[in-house]
Image (spheres, helix red, strand yellow):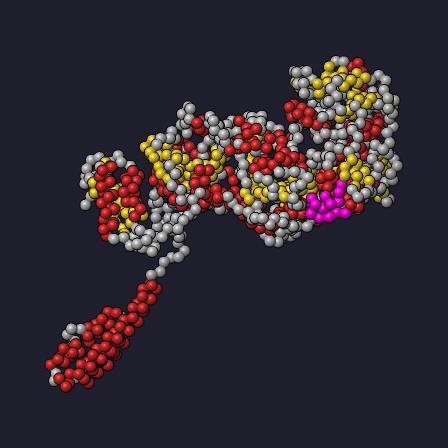
Amino acid sequence: MRAPLEWLHDYVRPDLPAAELAERLDMTGTKVERVERHGVGALDAFVVGRVLEAERHPDADRLTVCRVDVGGGAEASIVCGAPNVATGQTVAVARPGAVMPDGTELRAAKLRGVVSEGMILAEDELGIGTDHTEILVLDGGAAPGTPLVEVLPIATDVLELEITPNRPDCLGVYGVAREVHAATGAPLQAPPWSEDPGSAGGVEGVEIEVRDPDLAPRFTARRFDDVTIAPSPPWLKARLMAAGQRPINNVVDITNYVMLLTGQPLHAFDLDRVAGGRLVVRRARDGEEVETLDGEVRRLDPDVVVIEDAEGPTSIAGVMGGARSEVSQDTTRVLMEVATWIGPNIQRTSLRLGLRSEASARFEKQLQPEQAMEAQAVAAQLMVQLCGARLVEGTIDVGGPGPEPAVLALREARVAGLLGAAIPSGRSAEILRSLGFGVADGEVLSVTVPHWRRGDVEREVDLIEEVARIDGVDRLPATLPARPDRGGALSAEQHARRRVEDALVAQGLYEIQGWSFQGPSVADRLRLPEGDPRRGAVRLANPLSEEQSVLRTTLLGSLLDAAAHNAAHGHPDVRLFELGAVYPARADGHVPAAARGPAAERPGAGELPDEARRVGALLCGALAPASWRSPDAPRADFFAAKGALAALLDWMRVPWSVQSAREPFLHPGRCATVLLDGEPAGWLGELHPLVAESWDVQGAAGFELDLDRLAALAAARAARFRDVTSFPPVRQDLAVVLPAEVPAARALDVVRKAGGDLLRSVRVFDVYRGEQVGEGRVSLALALEFQAPDRTLTDEEVAERRTAIAAALAAELGGELRG
Amino acid sequence: MIERAQHLAAEARDAVHGASSTADLEEVRVRYLGRKAELPQMLRQVSQLPAEERGGAGQALNEARRAIESAVAGRAAELEEAELVARLERDRIDVTLPGDPVRELGRLHLITQTRREIEDVFLGLGFDVAEGPEVDLVHYNFDALNHAPGHPARAWTDTFYVSEDVVLRTHTSPVQIRAMEAAPPPLYVIVPGRVFRPDSDATHTPQFHQVEGLAVDEDVTLADLHGTLLAFARATFGDEREVRLRPHFFPFTEPSVEVDVSCFQCRGTGSVDGGRCPLCKGERWIEILGAGMVDPNVFGYVREYGYDPERIQGFAFGMGVERIAMLKHEVPDLRLFYDNDVRFLEQFG
């Protein structure tokens, strides 16, 4: 909303510079996005002039050399290109030094050899109109030398306002004036609709039928005869231009002017082109078509309201007029229509048709029925004044004004209780009155809501907001809530998730934030077979693009996207991780947390996906940057990924293991399922070469785990002290030859079980396959550490455990001790 | 013999002092204390002396030997230290060569880093951290937050829909309702999380992150909101910062405010080095979030869970995590957060 100060000053004139006024409005809830200078600069250089003499330029047919009286006894020679310049005219003159609306500075110049000391101006050159064919001829009242700004609104500051959707009353200059009055205390003039030249009752020759009053609460119309279509006077054009509208002709300009002033859109019909002199307001029929003012043919549906005459729809209610009954140069009779529509309905129509207009933008915020007659009153004054029109008796008014005003109580204690600072009742009353509320004093204020705030102020708390914003929320004290009962804390799971992040960062991994959306092709690129639950992706009904049309079911896609981005930018060696949500479609019978409890009963609860948190990691290429001491870092592979996983899970103190497994996107021989506390919770492995190729990354390995489960397990396991320092450990190595197909993890399980409580740890420190152990056999070298928490172990105790371990390896796995 | 021993001891002491290296010193030691040296030979001969002489001679000879040994040991320590000093002096490296870390450290993403910083401030102010689903019901995302059926935010142009009743949440505010359904007042929570809106340019990405705050109690006031956000702004942007509440409109708060922090680049003056401050554009204040007192209509949706709008009141606020990060770290383009370029990531976290 653009509010030219020159216009605003008709109704309120605060004694403040524009910037300070803007600040004051900002701080009382009317956001000023910027203050713009509209029109010309260097105002001293713009004066009224009188053409004393106008002669043909000696060397140019179309130019006239004028001698112009510019006041104070001075004359200027000015070369003019307009055809209508003539001796005796009073004109607008720019002298050298003048700054034109586009910011250029005017200088004296020679035109075809004749010096021109300035310019005789057309209205577009002043920013007060669009006409450039002729110079502006002023009426003769102003003496030469009079500053032009005293005659024409050639420069004004314009407030560019952001009006919040709850304040449609501020979508007009007078509404803004009310706010300025409340915010600054400057006196407010009576509204422009205080005097209505019109009368009530029926209008001859015009008939209106409203068939769907639920969508058209009020419909008013007045008839004007003897209308002369002409350009609007400069002051009106100037205001429209400053407010951002192009002048067209007096009637159309009046509708725009009144809308900009009152906030209420109007529509002028050429009454002679309203077939049958009768308008019907009704829902459109499905598929019905109408040609709008912009020349487009629009297809409608029954939620769109149309206004039709005997020949069919002429306009789309509240959105755009029709071409057929538009006011034209030949119009002599005007039917001025001002109506109230239902905001959400207009919004729907405007969205559905892709048609937004100044009118629809106002109607969709829900205007009040009273505003319709306010606009009729102002329009009637101007039609008579500017178009020579005769206002025909009567006003058609279907629907009438809105409901009786609400009366609300405002308690002083409630104001203080909500704001945390007292505002005396007297001050509240003063503020509310300044905003146009009726206030009856008393212990409790009794406040009557004016019609233009009907949609916004319905409760005591709404009054408190009014009082607070004008009194100044910036002046509230800064206090903290008094809450004696407890402090804040992360939950154990939230704390565990931070530890997961920290553990991966400590291992040199970079965290990424991937897209929650992806293209449907990701499932193919990951080689997910038909029927894989990870193909059950949730699809957006209105995606931005096909590449962002489904929700991810695994973090691997976004990790690969990030790796590919970096590889393409010269960084193929990356170590990445992500903690984030995946959103697989719901598996049969499973109810996600989001759909439990009260949510279970809500519409759509059955459509919520199985949203869950995951942690994923992806290592590509070299595991560390080459350094001057170690030029060849090891490269990402299964064991690098497993090492990162092991460090993470051991640090989280979660019992875990892996089992050989298959995943369609992983190398079939280098792939495992990760079990947390015995339950499958994710995958670990090297990428399938075809998957790596699809993303153009090399040598990648990673893992992905159920983060909710990991965090829950970690949260349930506080670290407990074990005494490992009071008594010395006994360390022994043991080499065992096993059939090659026995997994190392199985051998370690057997050793742990046989070793019992005294075996504190066992770890593989060497693996050997070759001649010395024979075909189909593998030798594992194990480091054993025995320790008791309450005594120093004897050699006999250790020997006994070692014998038991050897026996178990032989019996259960066919293992033989070496050496 | 005794005199000879004393003479040898004195001579040896001089030689020891004259030794200029550990090798020299070893030679001196062998000369006076080696198997074939005079003093040890004299010591071996003591047993052959008459009994009455043995005691005195033995004592004198042993004293001489100990004196020499002690001198050698002392000198050896001196020489070894000097030689170590000399060796270390020669053993110089180019300290300006790059370090070779035991293990390169990774990075938290700037969003996570910022989210944690925000969380930590509010944990310290007594708030818990609540979470909720990113795909949520229209009921939680709009209806229960007092968005009228025709509210523009509900439009397909402003919200990603999965179905008529299911959306990608457009803000973290739905968790306000879920948190109130889950626990009676007093409730003090913040809600960090990912949100979605169909927009894409330098200042909009279709996903971004917010932190919501909600404090509900019998006597929580708008002044308490002011104090809470002042504490946040100072912890985040510096101790000298001020915050300013400006009236605004949101469907789910009444009164509603926008909150500005005094510019931390120009210290609230609007100018830097005589020119207009590039951060606040000369405005002196930077908008950081929206907030307000919870609208009683919102409590109306959770009344049965202990939230009677006649008895309790509260404040709520919501801020963009990326916006805070962009302001603090001067990141010019929101899309950088989601490129996950390691050259970007390594600058933070």
Residue A121 appearing in the image: no
Q: Position of residue B55 (x, y in %)?
A: 17, 83
Q: Is residue B91 above or below residue A738?
A: below
**Is residue A598 in the magenta section?**
no
Q: Position of residue A19 (x, y in %)?
A: 73, 45
Residue B29 appearing in the image: yes
Residue positioned 26% across, 69% down in the render: B22
* Of A67 and B79, the residue lying toward us: B79
Residue positioned 70% across, 27% down in the render: A343
* Of A583 and A380, the residue lying toward us: A583
Q: Which quadrant does the N terminus of chain B fall into?
A: bottom left
* Of B25 and A484, the residue lying toward us: A484
Q: Is residue B15 above or below residue A235?
A: below
- Tell me if A789 is positioned left or right of A470 in this view: left
* Of A296 and A230, the residue lying toward us: A296
Q: Quadrant of residue B320?
A: top right
Q: Is residue A242 above or below residue A483?
A: above
- Tell me if A70 is positioned left or right of A318 in this view: right
What are the residue bounds of the magenta stretch? Answer: A410-424
Residue positioned 69% across, 17% down in the render: A284
- Tell me if A792 is positioned left or right of A48 in this view: left
**Is residue A419 in the magenta section?**
yes
Q: Position of residue B43 (x, y in %)?
A: 16, 78
Residue positioned 42% across, 32% down in the render: A695
Q: Quadrant of residue A531?
A: top left
> How many numbered dots are placed on residues in this image?
0
Q: Quadrant of residue A781?
A: top left
- Tell me if A517 is positioned left or right of A399 in this view: left
Residue furthest to the front in view is: A790
